[in-house]
Amino acid sequence: MNLEILRKLGLDKYEIKTYLTLLEIGRTTTGALVKKTGIPSSKIYHILGTLIEKGLVGYITEGKVKKFNANQPSVLRHLLDLQEAELVKLKVELEEIMPSLEAEFGSEKSEYNVELLEGLRGIKSFYDFALENTPKGGKMFTIGYPLLASNLLNAYFRDFHKKLAKSGLKTRVLYDYDTWFAKKREPRPHVEQRYLPKGIRTPAFMNIFQEYVGIMVVTEKQKLCILIKNKEVAESYFQYFDLLWKLGKKTE
């Protein structure tokens, strides 16, 4: 016999064993059931009680003794009907909460993603990405700008600032002291500029926009950008920028 069907109808192994034993031996006492099934007497009354609730077992009282019997197997169809009715009810309840589940699924989540962009090309790709993905009126702040990076990326950033001037972004740059005074600076009315106090150097400089932080490392041996996407991390870097901005020296 395929007992899996009975399990799917909601019977556990003890209920199945007890019900099949009653089908086999007919009306009997709990003592005989315990002996035949091997189920402890401490459990047999509970099992019989659940089978009675499901309509699979009945009983009569002869004197002071209860005798239990299996009901017609057709009752099992009733269990299936109950399951089908429960599924219909469950479907209705699921449809009721589905809009809120869909709304939660579509809501903004705090993503965390880290990418590594190698070489000067990777750094340029990052700044191109930042410009393309910061909406008009958005913030794009840069902390530090080492002299080596300024020399290597000078031509790129001259062109970048032409695009930035047309973007409508709120832009601030905190230069390294040595970088700021290394050459004569062009007027850039589209960006607020300050420089860090003398002695503070940033071989790794940072750009923050939207939910992104780019950490650029430019040394003789290594050039790369570590791109972090996380709203909370970006917000903490914006706060860090505000702190350093207050320490920065205003440019002429």
Image (cartoon, helix red, strand yellow):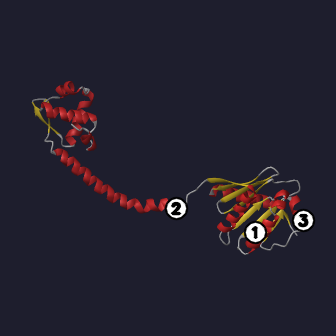
Question: Which three-letter amino acid code belongs to the residue tagged 2?
Answer: Ser
Question: Which three-letter amino acid code belongs to the residue tagged 1?
Answer: Phe
Of the numbered discs in the image, which one, if any, rests on residue 52?
A: none
Residue under label 3: 183
Sequence order check: which comes first, mark 2 or mark 3? 2
Vertical placement of residue 4 versus 209, above or below: above
- Residue at 52% across, 61% down: 107
The quarter of the image holding the N terminus is top left
Q: State which quadrant residue 21 falls in.
A: top left
Residue 75 placement (x, y as % from top left): 16, 45
* Label 2 residue SS: loop
What is the spatial separation of the Cα atoms under label 1 and label 2, in whole angstroms? 34 Å
Asked if one can make out residue 46 in the rendered structure from this viewpoint, the answer is: no
Vertical placement of residue 48 versus 87, above or below: above
Q: Nearer the viewer, residue 57 or 208?
A: 208
The quarter of the image holding the C terminus is bottom right
Q: State which quadrant residue 164 falls in.
A: bottom right
* Label 3 residue SS: loop
Sequence order check: which comes first, mark 1 or mark 2? 2
Residue 100 placement (x, y as % from top left): 44, 61
Of the numbered discs in the image, which one, if any, rests on residue 107?
A: 2
Q: Pointer 1: residues within 10 angstroms few (<14), some, or many (20+)?
A: some
Vertical placement of residue 54 versus 41, above or below: below
Q: Nearer the viewer, residue 252 or 157?
A: 157
